[in-house]
Amino acid sequence: MRKLFPFSFLFPFLLAFAAATSASAQGTSQERSDCMGDAMRFCSSDIPFVEEIESCLQQNIARLSPACRREFAPTQSTKLREEHFQ
């Protein structure tokens, strides 16, 4: 007779929880970029075109929020996607 781990019945629930946690770690479209607010504030006429937004952010780099500057400065790109503005 095999001895089963006493809580083996929980395994499917743990898998489901892990999958849900992974999906929620991606966040909402608002949480995906620290530059969303700055894009709205400085570059609203360029929305939803990410390349234009990033060009606008470059022109306003001194005025960006610290969080956006940390995201944007190293690569001159953001995590923004056109679908974030729908």
Image (cartoon, grey):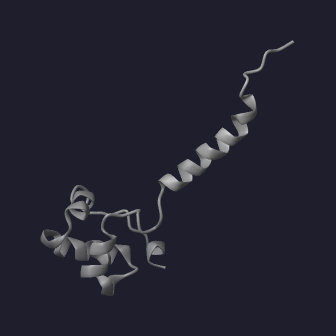
36 to 12, vertically: above or below? below
Image quadrant assignment for residue 76:
bottom left
Residue 30 placed where, x, y %? 42, 69
Q: Residue furthest front?
A: 6
Q: Quadrant of residue 52?
A: bottom left
17 with respect to 84 (left or right): right
Residue in the image at 69% along x and 42% along y: 13
Horizontal side, residue 34 vs residue 30: left or right? left
Residue 82: image location, x then y, percent: 44, 74
Q: Nearer the viewer, residue 19 or 53?
A: 19
Please give the name of the residue rendered at 26% of the width and 80% of the height, measured from the top-left corner. 41
Residue at the spot x=41%, y=62% of the render?
32
Give the quarter of the figure containing the N terminus: top right
Q: Residue at point 25% right, 64% down?
A: 68
Relative vertical location of residue 4 with respect to residue 49 in this rendering, above or below: above
Name the residue furthest top: 1
Residue closest to the far bottom: 45
Q: Position of residue 29 (x, y in %)?
A: 46, 67
| Nearer to us in this view, 73 or 33 | 33
36 is higher (above) or lower (below) than 48: above
